[in-house]
Image: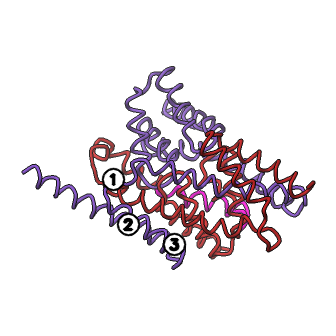
């Protein structure tokens, strides 16, 4: 019993530390896990970590949260997963709370306002580059382009909620894949 | 207060369940927080920049920011729990049936449709940010456009990292809008 709690505590502490260094996107946490669990402790293989990452990435929600849950569950069941997730998000939440406090305090300051106006000008190219980076492999079949165009138009001009549009994507994806799979199977036959 | 917290939780549960990675969360977050009046579009821009400069994934950072705006620290915790809901439920189930989930093609089929939608949404949000982020004191700002174009070159051509681009834009903003 005591051993189990010690294991949970170690898990919590390790993911707390990961959480302190997850700049931009969260790939750094995978790198940290690789260093600690694959290379040092040898608790999982590099292939297993890769499997966890790819499943974590394909599920909804934040990728690193999912990875933390999948790894924690493996080591200590649901409680282990839960602890890993909570431990990992605590540092960024505290940091962001402090930043939000200062942001609210200083956002009327003329110097801060000028700097933020510059920063806002950077957001459009940043998001555009994220969209471009996603393009690779995103259009598996021709109708996928229609989905993208429809999402763009419905979001921008008709103010359709994103939830509806993502649901449209889910259904569209299932239908499109099913159609092309059958077509592919027909060719082979 | 309780009502605000419940609205907040529900909003971020929706965001959590419909987001598939990285910046594709921005349109969802933007829609929810703006329509509920927790943040305006400029603040969404600011939080994207802040989230890119600080530890933690974008979705959680936005949750903290919007949560505090809506209901203080309790709001932050509530919104974070909302974003994490799929992780704490769906992913936990997936973890229990890991072998099966890994072999299933269902997720890949779903993503076949979701990825293009995310790209469409991202372009949509880019279009709406174009309308707010290059307007200063209700006039189109040439300085802001210059910063944006310069950043585009840095990002697309020279592959400069996002935090560096944000820092540079802040410095340029200081020079062009305050000292210029």
Q: Is residue A130 above or below residue A109?
A: above
Measured from the top left, where is residue A93 in percent x and y? 67, 50
**Residue under mark 2: which chain is it in?**
A
**Residue under mark 3: which chain is it in?**
A
Element at label 2:
helix
Q: Is residue A79 above or below residue A152?
A: above
Which corner quadrant of the image does residue B95 belong to? top left
Q: Nearer the viewer, residue A107 or B138?
A: B138
Task: Identify the residue at image location x=47%, y=39%.
Answer: A72
Task: Identify the residue at image location x=63%, y=39%.
Answer: B158
What is the number of the mark on residue A155? 3
The shade of chain B is red
Query: Are labels 2 and 1 assigned to the same chain?
Result: yes
Pick out the residue farthest to the top: A40
Q: Which residue is mark 1?
A: A140
Q: Nearer the viewer, residue A168 or B39?
A: A168
Of the residues under marks 2 and 1, which one precedes in the sequence? 1
Q: Nearer the viewer, residue A84 or A62?
A: A62
Task: Identify the residue at image location x=16%, y=57%.
Answer: A183
Element at label 3:
helix
Pick out the residue farthest to the left: A189
Measured from the top left, where is residue B153 in percent x and y? 65, 47
Q: Is residue A49 above or below residue A39?
A: below
Read off the magenta span: B66-86
Task: Specify whether A112 is left or right of B105.
Answer: right
Question: Which chain is tinted purple?
Answer: A
Query: Are labels 3 and 1 assigned to the same chain?
Result: yes
Query: Mark 2 packing: few (<14 Cα in 10 Å), some, or many (20+)?
Result: some
């Amino acid at each position: 019993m005591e051993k189990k709690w010690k294991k949970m505590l170690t898990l919590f502490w390790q993911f707390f530390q990961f959480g302190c260094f997850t700049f931009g996107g969260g790939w750094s946490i995978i790198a940290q896990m690789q260093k600690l669990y694959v290379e040092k402790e040898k608790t999982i293989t590099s292939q297993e970590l890769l499997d966890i990452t790819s499943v974590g990435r394909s599920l909804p929600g934040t990728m690193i949260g999912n990875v933390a849950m999948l790894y924690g569950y493996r080591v200590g069941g649901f409680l282990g997963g839960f602890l890993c997730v909570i431990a990992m998000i605590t540092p960024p939440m505290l940091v962001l709370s402090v930043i939000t406090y200062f942001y609210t305090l200083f956002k009327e300051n003329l110097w801060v306002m000028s700097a933020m106006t510059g920063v806002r000008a950077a957001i459009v190219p940043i998001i555009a580059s994220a969209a471009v980076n996603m393009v690779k492999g995103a259009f598996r079949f021709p109708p996928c382009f229609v989905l993208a165009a429809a999402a763009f138009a419905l979001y921008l001009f008709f103010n359709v909620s994103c939830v509806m549009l993502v649901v449209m994507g889910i259904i569209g994806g299932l239908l499109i894949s099913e159609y092309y799979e059958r077509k592919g199977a027909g060719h082979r036959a | 207060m309780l009502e605000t917290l419940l609205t907040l939780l529900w909003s971020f549960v929706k965001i959590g369940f419909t987001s598939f990675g990285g910046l594709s969360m921005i349109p969802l977050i933007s829609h929810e927080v703006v329509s509920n009046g927790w943040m305006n579009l400029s603040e969404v821009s600011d939080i994207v920049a802040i989230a890119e400069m600080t530890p933690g994934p974008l979705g959680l950072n936005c949750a903290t920011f919007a949560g505090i705006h809506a209901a203080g620290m309790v709001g932050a915790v509530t919104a974070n729990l909302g974003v994490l809901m799929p992780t704490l439920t769906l992913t936990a189930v997936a973890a229990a049936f890991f072998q099966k989930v890994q072999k299933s093609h269902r997720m890949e089929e779903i993503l076949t449709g979701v990825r293009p939608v995310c790209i469409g949404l991202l372009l949509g949000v880019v279009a709406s940010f174009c309308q707010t982020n290059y307007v200063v004191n209700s006039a189109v700002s040439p300085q802001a456009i210059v910063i944006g174009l310069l950043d585009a070159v840095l990002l697309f051509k020279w592959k400069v990292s996002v935090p560096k681009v944000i820092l540079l834009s802040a410095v340029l903003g200081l020079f062009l809008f305050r000292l210029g």
